[in-house]
Amino acid sequence: MAKPKVYKCGFRHCQHESCEVSQEEAVQVGRRYFHSDCAEIYYNMQEIQRLYREKISNTVVMPQLLSVINNIVFTKHIESSYLLFALKFAINTKISIRSPYSLHYLVDRYQVKEAWKKKQSQKVRAVKFEAAPQKAPTFSFAAPKQTKDIGDLFG
């Protein structure tokens, strides 16, 4: 039997005890291998950078933007999916974002938090509907039909 190949996680901020990932669990991005959750964070951070560059400012200083994103995700421990949602929400509702540092204030906005809660509750509702119980067999009882004539009344 061949031993499964083990790779080192390609994510710089990997938070697993050992940065090693087996071939069965690995997600390949380009030439690098990631844990599945590390790959999700990586994709979200790439999407945040792309959206900021395309929709908000194409003249942004990228090291500054990366520093802000890393600070929010890894120092403040805010989910990368929440930051991505907040940025998309700000773009759709035309909330003013003048610099990368305003992302710190964006994740603390009441409107964004309420929209995130609403989105999460809709996800939970969708999962509940998917896991609806199967129809249980129903028992039907029918009393035997009796003919009623005048003789039945008097016994």
Image (cartoon, rainbow, N blue to C red):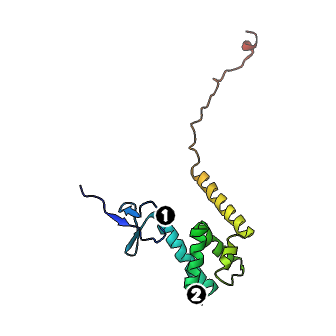
Query: Mark 2 near mark 1, Cβ–Cβ under 8 Å?
Result: no
Q: Between disc 2 and disc 1, whose residue precedes? A: 1
Residue nearest the viewer, comparing 30 with 142: 30
Task: Name the quadrant containing residue 2.
Answer: bottom left
Q: Does residue 91 appear anywhere in the picture? A: no
Label 1 sits on residue: 15
The residue that disc 2 covers is 61
Above-or-below relation of 1 to 150: below
* Mark number displayed over residue 107: none
Amino acid identity at mark 2: Val
The residue at the far bottom in this view is 59
- Crowd around label 2: few <14 · some 14–19 · many ≥20 (10 Å): few
In the rendered image, residue 55, in percent from the top left (x then y), is placed at 62, 84
Name which residue lies at 72% across and 70% down. Answer: 109
Q: Residue at x 44, y 60 (%)?
A: 17
Quadrant housing the N terminus? bottom left
